[in-house]
Image (cartoon, rainbow, N blue to C red):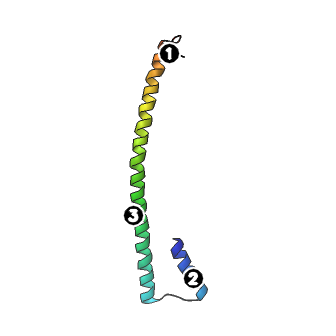
Amino acid sequence: MAVSAAAVGGLVVAGIELEDRAEQIFEAAMLILAAGFLTGMILWMQRQGASWRGVDRERMHVRERDRRLGVVRRGFPGRCA
């Protein structure tokens, strides 16, 4: 998006308007650039989600272990510090 804004800003400052074929080429280039960016972002989010699932599972196991220890501690209040 920043590339597109910079390109448009440069054209406005220079007083140039894209017409017909040049406008179509510019629009197609920006569309392809945006599609590539979005695809990269989706793939990145998938990788991040996969790594977070592992972290969440580990946290869940720790909570379950702590919950069980809590039951034991309440069962024997004088023996656990």
- How many residues crowd around disc 2 within 10 Å: few (fewer than 14), some, or many (20 or more)? few
User: Which residue is the site of mark 3?
Assistant: 39
Q: Secondary structure at mark 1?
A: helix
Percent coordinates x, y for residue 61 in the rendering? 41, 32
Q: Is residue 50 above or below residue 19?
A: above
3 and 1 marks in contact (CB < 8 Å) = no
Q: Secondary structure at mark 2?
A: helix
Percent coordinates x, y for residue 26 in the rendering? 45, 81
Q: Is residue 6 above or below residue 76?
A: below
Q: Is residue 53 above or below residue 81?
A: below
User: Which residue is the site of mark 2?
Assistant: 10
The residue most toward the right is 13
Percent coordinates x, y for residue 35 in the rendering? 40, 69
Residue drawn at point x = 56 percent, y = 77 percent: 6
User: Which residue is the site of mark 1?
Assistant: 74
**If you read the primary sequence from the N terminus, does the residue marked by circle 2 or circle 3 appear first?**
2
Q: CA distance from mark 1 to mark 2?
A: 71 Å
Q: Identity of the amino acid at label 1?
A: Arg
Q: Identity of the amino acid at label 2?
A: Gly
Q: CA distance from mark 3 to mark 1?
A: 52 Å
Judged left or right of residue 10, residue 44 is left
Percent coordinates x, y for residue 43 in the rendering? 39, 58
Give the camera-side residue of 26 and 40.
Answer: 40
Q: Identity of the amino acid at label 3?
A: Thr
Residue drawn at point x = 47 percent, y = 89 percent: 19
2 and 3 marks in contact (CB < 8 Å) = no
Residue drawn at point x = 43 percent, y = 34 percent: 60
Q: CA distance from mark 2 to mark 3?
A: 27 Å
Q: Quadrant of the C terminus?
A: top right
